[in-house]
Image: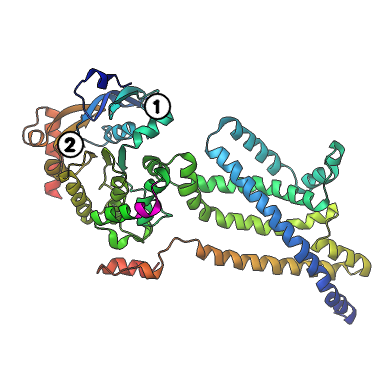
Amino acid sequence: MEWHQACGMVQNMLEVKNLHKKFGSNEVLKGIDFQIDKGEVVAVIGPSGSGKTTLLRCISFLERADQGTITFEGLHYDMQHITSKEIRKLRLGMGFVFQGFHLFRNMTALGNVMEGLVTARKVPKAAAKKTAWEMLRKVGMEDRAMYYPDQLSGGQQQRVAIARAIALNPQVILFDEPTSALDPELTGEVLDVMRTLAKEGTTMVVVTHEMRFAMEAASRVVFMEGGLVVEEASSAALFSDPKEERTRQFLRRTIADYDRG
Amino acid sequence: MNARIVEILVSSFTKILLPGIRVTIPLTLASFALSFLLGMLLAIVQVAQIKVLRQIAKLYIWIFRGTPLLVQLFIIFFGLPRLGIILDAFPAAVIAFGMNLGAYNAEVFRSAIQAIPQGQTEAAQMIGLNYPQTLLRVVLPQAFPIAFPSLFNNLISLLKDTSLASSITVIELFTAAQQIAARTYEPFALYCEAAVIYLIFSTFLTWLQGWLEKKLVWKTKEKYLVGAGNEQQEERLNNL
């Protein structure tokens, strides 16, 4: 298991190799290699149906991959045959921010942020509350701490969801299209929070359609299409000088859409 | 109405009401408590995908929903003694009603649990909650308000169905009415009187349901609401 460490190999914090996933006969991921270093912000872009979200869901084991290996925090697992106990252990180092927020509707914003600390990690309530307040302040939501999700706007809910993720101090946070379910005027407040996290050196994987965010905040960009990684490069390189024709087409199309919008 | 019937109705009122309060209501509450726990258990076993237990739960629901309540009552009270299991009438009735309604409540809980979006469970898993914690902290608290109206519906049905216990010698509301009717030869007046008393009980339950449903909404208490200058937000909160 800890063979990589034993050999003293240089390695990434999170590395996925040869990831395959089918839904029925539909092959969504056709052998993805993906890695991220500590402190990196990786944006995953690509057209709808390219497998970006499935990639994140396989990494976090919300979907079970058909084939592939994952190395995370120095431990190596077969993604198909991993046990549920190992999955729980892996997830302790991961945060996940969903497109649909998925705040617990029966808890206040504060309760949502405290839950992972108190119930899963057995942090004493007083300490958990203190951490939760800090996190809510960080995302600018401390004045809404006692509100229930239904009383908050989409942007506010997503900020609370980010606070819920960072409160557990994960090694990496996976963002699955965090602004896609929001009204256009509400995306800014969420992206601002994410930019702040990026600047602080939080390791982040962001599946996104927000090209400007990818351009400005990501250190590296991965372009996916048809279940494969077509091209990956530093954000500056990929946007200014894409090597692959398909990347060029995609960028032309999306950036034209932007200008129209 | 002649004076004799009025006399009978007045004098029998407390004689029917008292067994109603002393027997019908405890019988209803005890049976419902059993059916609640049983229903919850049968629902969890099904949604948790525990293979063998799931099949047992389905079999149980199939049998108890598919056979008449009166027949179940007779099997438990008159039939089981043949197998050496002898129960008093009241506990036999509680078991029969509880087990029967448990099958119905299981379906209520199951559909309510399945109505909770998958995302809630996924979010719980990603912050490190295990399956029992996810159920207890996230899924069940949200499923309960959804299940509540149907559960209460079943409770009101149960209240009336307890009259079947008269057939296994439980002295409850309807048994009392039957006895007085037999003595006075006024079945119409007395059974109507019994019906009115059931109606009073179920009216109270209906009112209770409305009151409790209002309490089940998650809503921030006024004292926690702060004005942050966002007028739209304030307005939405005021309209909640």
Q: Does the magenta stretch include residue A127?
A: yes
Q: Which colour scheme is used?
A: rainbow
Mostly what secondary structure, the magenta segment?
A: helix
Q: Kindly give the residue lying farthest to the bottom in the view shown.
A: B3
Q: Nearer the viewer, mark 2 or mark 1?
A: 2
Residue at left 83%, top 40%? B85
Amino acid identity at mark 1:
Gly
Chain identifier of the residue bearing label 2 in the image:
A
For residue B58, which quarter of the picture? top right
Q: Does the magenta stretch include residue A207?
A: no
Residue A261, percent from left and from top: 15, 50
Q: Residue A25 placed where, x, y %?
A: 38, 24
**Residues in magenta, as a range:** A123-129
Which comes before the other along the chain, label 2 or label 1?
Answer: 1
Q: What residue is shown with label 1?
A: A24
Q: Name the residue under label 2.
A: A40
In the displayed structure, B155 sits above or below A79; it is below
Which corner quadrant holds the N terminus of chain A? Answer: top left
Whole-percent x, y for residue B44 in the image? 56, 41
Assess whether mark 1 and mark 2 are in contact (beta carbons under 8 angstroms): no
Q: Please check whether the numbered discs 2 and 1 fall on a single chain.
A: yes
Query: In this image, B11 relative to A155: left or right?
Result: right
Q: Nearer the viewer, residue B61 or A4?
A: A4
Q: Give me the chain letter of mark 1.
A: A
Q: Can residue B41 be seen in this view?
A: yes
Q: Which amino acid does label 2 sit on?
A: Glu
Residue at point 29% right, 36% down? A53
- CA gap, disc 2 to disc 1? 34 Å
Vertical relation: A128 (above or below) A244: below
Q: What crowding class fits label 2: few (fewer than 14 Cα within 10 Å), some (14-19), or many (20 or more)?
A: some
Q: In this view, does A234 lie above or below B204?
A: above
